[in-house]
Image (tube, grey):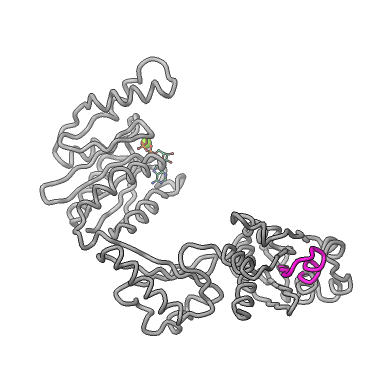
């Protein structure tokens, strides 16, 4: 079954509102295995709304619309759809009662204004989709050829609740049984470029044992998502686990997690297993690495703390970085990263000291030290590891990628040592 989305509102066409509804709906439907094949945005006129929905139905697709269910004259979606289906709009007494209650529960006095009455005008023959968070109910209409239109309000919070509570269960029940089961498993990778993966994966690049493989690049690296459809849940999970094993064998050291785990959590667990305590010295990330580690509950038995050494004076005073090193190599350098890592390890008395220093941009780059250049060093006591690299993206992305690289350096060293 294919679906089209029609989002309605002049504010969307003007660019005042970003159409987050369509993206959200598409993601929800994808989880069911239902594809969105076209998205259309139209203004608040009856004619454009009817044209867009008529076109989608003619192409043989289900349609989800959002917007234009409000109480004002520019809310024309229901009249447009009713006319398209050749049905009159009928006052729904039960929905009106619900709207009155909603009005009173909000502490408003008197009766709702007459303007609200148009919100409970329902096309004859339609199924009402109740709105637990707002005044406008949605409607669902089906035509004789099996086409359908779900009409939802534009307010994202209301629309989302209605999709989850009403539309998804209804769609699920209509899917052929063999398509009803969709299971997926994430294999999280970092430190490898998306374009390198096909060669590494070889014959698995297109999918593994009936499971499709999707490449999802993000700030954490690349997530490989294995998905199986139309197989009973237990069987699907077993096959996905086997597929994941094959993928992990090929991708090897770049894989840091199976399932939706953050690398910080993986690193904390590895340190915990080895009774290692950790401290951070952060310049360009300004505490981001510490924040990632402390966002994991139970971090305290591994993570001791750290120093936000943003200014050179702090690198010297609190971490013992030599002024001479700073003068000679500059704050963003291998040498300073090493001294920061060693310094925080010594001064906080931990097993592993991690340091990050870089140019997060967008200003402050030079030809020798461009925006995105980051040095990461980890002092393990038994050895130091250090790596300089150039990250891309905006300031937030560069900072996040730097924290990811630092965590990954710890993970790799501990994995290598066993
Ligand atoms: P209501 O019944 O509450 O009046 P409505 O169905 O008339 O809602 P709109 O008036 O079109 O919906 O939009 C209400 C709010 O929802 C506005 O703030 C609008 O910016 C937001 N909104 C509408 N459509 C979208 C969309 N596609 N993506 C994100 N936000 C949206
Ligand atoms: Mg409106």
In this view, the residue farthest toward the left is 144
Q: Which residues are magenta?
A: 341-357
Say whether residue 347 is magenta.
Answer: yes
- 113, 218: nearer the viewer: 218
Tally the marks.
Answer: 0
Going by the image, does 112 lie left or right of 350?
A: left
Considering the image in quadrants, where does the N terminus appear? bottom left
Quarter of the image for residue 165 reads top left
What is the x, y in percent for residue 289?
Answer: 66, 61
Image coordinates for residue 354, horizontal then vertical, percent: 71, 68
Is 102 in front, or is 56?
102
* Quarter assignment of residue 151: top left
Toward the top, the furthest residue is 110
Locate residue 118, reporting x and y percent.
28, 28
In reply to whether residue 222 is colored magenta, the answer given is no
- Work out whether 197 lies above or below 141: below
- Identified at 39% across, 70% down, the residue is 214
Which quadrant holds residue 282?
bottom right
Quadrant location, ligand no. 1: top left
Q: Position of residue 332 (x, y in %)?
A: 75, 71
What's the residue at 19%, 38% (across, down)? 126
Relative to 167, residue 61 above or below: below
């Amino acid at each position: 079954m294919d679906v089209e989305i029609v989002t309605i509102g002049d504010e969307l066409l003007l660019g005042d509102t970003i159409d987050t509804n369509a993206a959200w709906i598409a993601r929800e439907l994808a989880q069911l295995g239902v594809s969105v094949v076209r998205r259309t945005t139209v203004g608040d006129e009856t004619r454009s709304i009817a044209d867009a929905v008529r076109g989608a139905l003619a192409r043989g697709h289900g349609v989800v619309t959002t917007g234009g269910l409000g109480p004002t004259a520019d809310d024309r979606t229901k009249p447009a759809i009713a006319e398209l289906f050749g049905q009159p709009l009928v006052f729904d007494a039960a929905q009106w009662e619900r709207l009155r209650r909603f009005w009173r529960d909000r502490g408003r006095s008197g009766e709702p204004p007459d303007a609200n009455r148009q919100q409970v005008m329902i096309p004859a023959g339609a199924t009402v989709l109740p709105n637990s968070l707002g005044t406008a109910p949605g409607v669902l209409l089906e035509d004789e050829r099996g086409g359908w239109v779900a009409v939802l309000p534009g307010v994202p919070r209301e629309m989302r609740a209605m999709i989850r509570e009403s539309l998804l269960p209804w769609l699920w029940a209509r899917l052929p049984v063999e398509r009803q089961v969709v299971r997926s498993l994430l294999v999280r990778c970092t430190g490898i470029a998306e374009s390198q993966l096909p060669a590494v994966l070889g014959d698995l690049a297109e999918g593994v044992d009936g499971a499709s493989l999707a490449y999802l690049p993000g700030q954490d690296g690349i997530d490989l998502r294995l998905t199986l459809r139309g197989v009973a849940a237990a069987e699907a999970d077993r096959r996905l686990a086997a597929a994941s094993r094959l993928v992990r064998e090929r991708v090897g050291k770049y894989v840091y997690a199976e399932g939706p785990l953050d690398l910080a959590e993986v690193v904390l667990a590895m340190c915990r297993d080895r009774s290692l305590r950790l401290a951070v010295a952060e310049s360009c990330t300004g505490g981001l690495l510490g924040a990632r580690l402390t966002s994991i509950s139970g971090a305290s038995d591994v993570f001791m703390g750290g120093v936000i050494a943003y200014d050179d004076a702090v690198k010297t005073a609190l971490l013992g970085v030599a002024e001479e090193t700073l003068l000679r190599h500059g704050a963003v350098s291998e040498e300073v990263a090493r001294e920061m890592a060693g310094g925080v390890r010594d001064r906080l008395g931990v097993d592993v000291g991690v340091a990050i220093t870089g140019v997060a941009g967008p200003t402050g780059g030079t030809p020798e030290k461009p925006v995105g250049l980051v040095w990461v060093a980890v002092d393990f006591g038994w050895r130091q590891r250090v790596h300089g690299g150039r990250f891309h993206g905006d300031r937030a992305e560069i900072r996040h990628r730097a924290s990811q690289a630092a965590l990954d350096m710890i993970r790799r060293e501990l994995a290598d040592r066993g």
